[in-house]
Image (tube, rainbow, N blue to C red):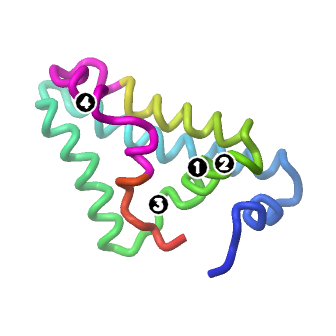
Amino acid sequence: MGLTRGDLYKGFKDKKTYLRVLEYCESKAVADAFTLLVGQPGADDVERIVALFDSISIAALRGEHRGCFLRTAASGGRCRPDISGAVLLKMHGGFVRPLQHIRYYRKLKSRASRVFWFRSMPGCGC
C-alpha cells in the first residue's frame, strides 16, 4: 500500500485526535483479549489461551484486519517513542495480567517476550 507509520500519524487532524482514536482501539482490542484470557468461571487455563488464538484465527479467515492500527503505533518507536511505549505496555498488560494466575505462567514467561507477540501475530494486510 505504500503507507508508512508517519503517514498514519499525519492522517489525523492533530495529536489529540490520534491519541483518542488510538485509546479507543486499545481499549477494544486489549479488553477483548483480556476477556478471553480471563475466561468463564471454571475455564481451564489451556481453554482460555486457545479461545484467544481461535478468535484471532477466525478474524483472519474472515478477512478482518484487527490490530493493524495498534501494531503500527506500537512498532513506531523511532517516530513516537512515547506513544509506542505506552501501546506496548497496555498490550503486554492485556496478556500478562490474566496469564499470571495460570499454572504454566513461569514457563510461558521464560519463553515469551513482547517481540514474540508481534512476530507471532498473523499478517493483517497493513
Residue drawn 88% across and 53% down? 14
**Range drawn in magenta:** 98-118
Task: Give the residue at mark 2.
Answer: 22
- The CA span between labels 3 and 2 is 13 Å
What kind of element bears circle 4?
Answer: helix
Q: Earlier in the sequence, mark 1 or mark 4?
A: 1
- Residue 4 sits above or below residue 35 on the image: below
Task: Give the residue at mark 3.
Answer: 66
- The CA span between labels 4 and 3 is 24 Å
Q: Nearer the viewer, mark 1 or mark 4?
A: 4
What kind of element bears circle 1?
Answer: helix
Q: Earlier in the sequence, mark 4 or mark 3?
A: 3
Which residue type carries mark 2?
Leu
- The CA span between labels 1 and 4 is 26 Å
Please give left or right for residue 72 compared with residue 99 in the image: right
Please give left or right for residue 37 compared with residue 92 in the image: left
Q: Quadrant of the C terminus?
A: bottom right
What kind of element bears circle 3?
Answer: loop
Q: Nearer the viewer, mark 2 or mark 4?
A: 4
User: Percent position (x, y) of residue 95?
Assistant: 38, 34
State yes or no: discs 1 and 2 in contact (Cβ < 8 Å): yes
Q: Earlier in the sequence, mark 2 or mark 4?
A: 2
Q: Which mark is residue 108?
A: 4
